[in-house]
Image (tube, helix red, strand yellow):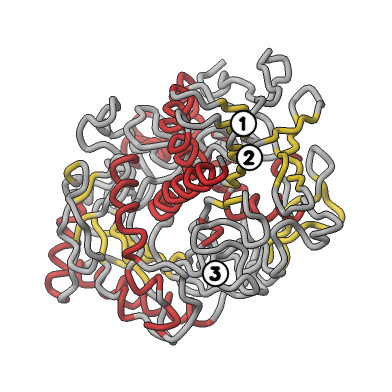
Amino acid sequence: MSGAESVGDERSDADGVDRTPVPDADVCVIGAGPAGALAADRLAGDHEVVVLDAGPRFDPADRLARQERAIRPFYDRPDVWGVGGARDAHENAGNRFYPLNHARVKGVGGSTLHWQGMVMRLHEDDFNSGRERGVGPDWPIDYVDLRPYYAEAERELGVAGASDNPYAPPREEPHPMPAFEPSYSDSLFAEACESLGIDMHSVPNARNSEPYDDRSPCVGYGTCQPVCPSGAKYDATVHVERAEERGATVIDRAPVQRLDHDGDDRVTAAVYATPDGEEHRQEADAFVVAAGGVETPRLLLLSASDRYPDGLANGSGHVGEFFMDHLFAGAGGTLDEPTRQNHVGFYTSACDQFYDEADEAQAPFKLEFFNYAGPSPVEMALSGDDWGDALLERLRDGYGTHVAMGGLVEQLPDAESRVTLADDRTDDHGNPVPRIEWTVGDRALDTIERANEIQVSILEELGADVEWVAGPDATGPAYHHMGTTRMSDDPDRGVVDADCRTHDLDNCWIASSSVFPTSGAMNPTLTIAALALRVGDGVADWLADET
């Protein structure tokens, strides 16, 4: 049996784990991904904290086996972390298919177990899109409100970066670690960009460029998505374990079925299931829902009651609405020279030069210079039928001459783009699965064309034969689920207030990208982390006032 095939069965029932509720809990956190882990760690020590996660704990010793599974053509990406089946079923509707299970993980660590690890701050205008760009809602907080939490989030995650991006928002201190050096293909792109007057700069990464937080520096496995065997790339198990060391209790394989509330508009318990078929009620004084942009609204909708017939915390009617993701724009081809691709599993250079040109017609977008264009030698060796000299010849002729660029484009919030409950399909506990209606507007599609124009011009200046373009007709999501419980000062226009506390229930907070009123075009995890730390402080203050 191969290492990949011997990865443990995380869904075995007979594991002997105690999953009974924690008595006298101060805080119940739902979800052990980055937001839940950071909030739990923030509150543990001073408070009795319990964390419930729908998925299993993954044994770190299995990561090499998961890496092997990731590089074998036989396996698809969801196979690496055991995603699929009735537990993870979903439905699609609307005019675009959304491949939800392609890039999510249910388990302790959440999406950070398989993410690429890019951590940028949103720009100042992202918080004031309506006022500054003439389109979309404004956030009820500004960049300055989140700025100290951004800095703390960078320290908590461990971010390698440099202050060489003239288009980035202002910062108060250097990144915790130096940036990764530009790659060889970055140097090729740099010549073309200089000729065209296009600026390149480094990319902040939540992976160690040097030893940090008792974790090793990156050793170059190159399989960052979907698994980092070395632990150099941050994942939320770091803060889960830290929270446990400070007294928090983490209960895995405990999917929350609903939230109960009392007549005083307070959540009283999270009702969760366990592998033995039992249901338990975890009571607490305060609740933090940190289940991501799809499962968070689903849980609130599943928690409908006589008082909240349309779903818990849904007095506005907006739970599940305004589902957003980032749209991909890309182009690539080949050069008549080596490009040394696939030596690095993440990108090290980007361009934000055009980001703040955004207005009513053009969305903010960023450009990425890939270090992983074309197939890797492993992919080529495992996907062909030839061996020996024939394989070596194919590798010599086909490997290492590819170049490619990517980019992310903002999608505006639209009430018709939403997460609801399926009518006639249920999960392994008999609950309606999430139904996703993903709608993309013309502004984003037009901006993809603009990004493609710049990408093709760079590749042509480089001397590449452009062989593919991912334009408006071929775009797809970045798997950044945002907007489904959005933040608003007005209870009629959103689900949570400026502190991420639900308007309807005064002891329930949401820590997730689901609270984003707009998406910007920056990877969302650093903003999620900053908001989670801020939520932790807000919950602590509330608990202090209650005693």
At label 2, counting other C-alpha atoms closer than 10 Å, the crowd grade (few under 14, some 14-19, many 20 or more) is: many
Please identify the quadrant where the C terminus is shown: top right
Where does residue 215 sit, x and y in percent of width and height? 30, 27
Query: Residue placed at 75% from the left, 33% from the top?
Result: 281
Q: Residues within 10 Å of mark 3 (few under 14, many from 20)?
A: many
Which badge, 1 or 3, comes first in the chain's sequence?
Answer: 1
**Residue, disc 1:** 25
Counting residues from the start of the chain, the first of labels 1 and 2 encountered is 1
Q: Cβ–Cβ below 8 Å for labels 1 and 2?
A: yes
Q: How many marks?
A: 3
Residue 96, given in percent of the width and then of the height, sits at 64, 68
Q: Quadrant of the N terminus?
A: top right
Q: Is residue 316 left or right of residue 135?
A: right
* Residue 208: image location, x then y, percent: 26, 36
Say which amino acid is labelled 3: Ser
Residue at x-position 39% and y-position 46%: 116
In the rendered image, which residue does mark 2 sit on?
A: 285
- State the residue at coordinates (44%, 24%): 246
**Image-based side of 527 in relation to 190, left or right:** right
Q: Is residue 116 visible?
A: yes
Which one is in front in this view, the residue at disc 3 or the one at disc 2? 2
Residue at the disc numbered 3? 488
Measured from the top left, where is residue 147 in percent x and y? 31, 58
User: Of tags 1 and 3, which is closer to the observer?
Assistant: 1
Q: Which type of secondary structure does the marked residue at label 1 adopt?
A: loop
Kind of residue at badge 2: Asp
Q: Residues within 10 Å of mark 1 (few under 14, many from 20)?
A: some
The answer to whether the residues at label 1 and label 3 have Cβ atoms under 8 Å apart is: no
N-term mark: 3 or 2: 2
Q: Amino acid at mark 1?
A: Ala
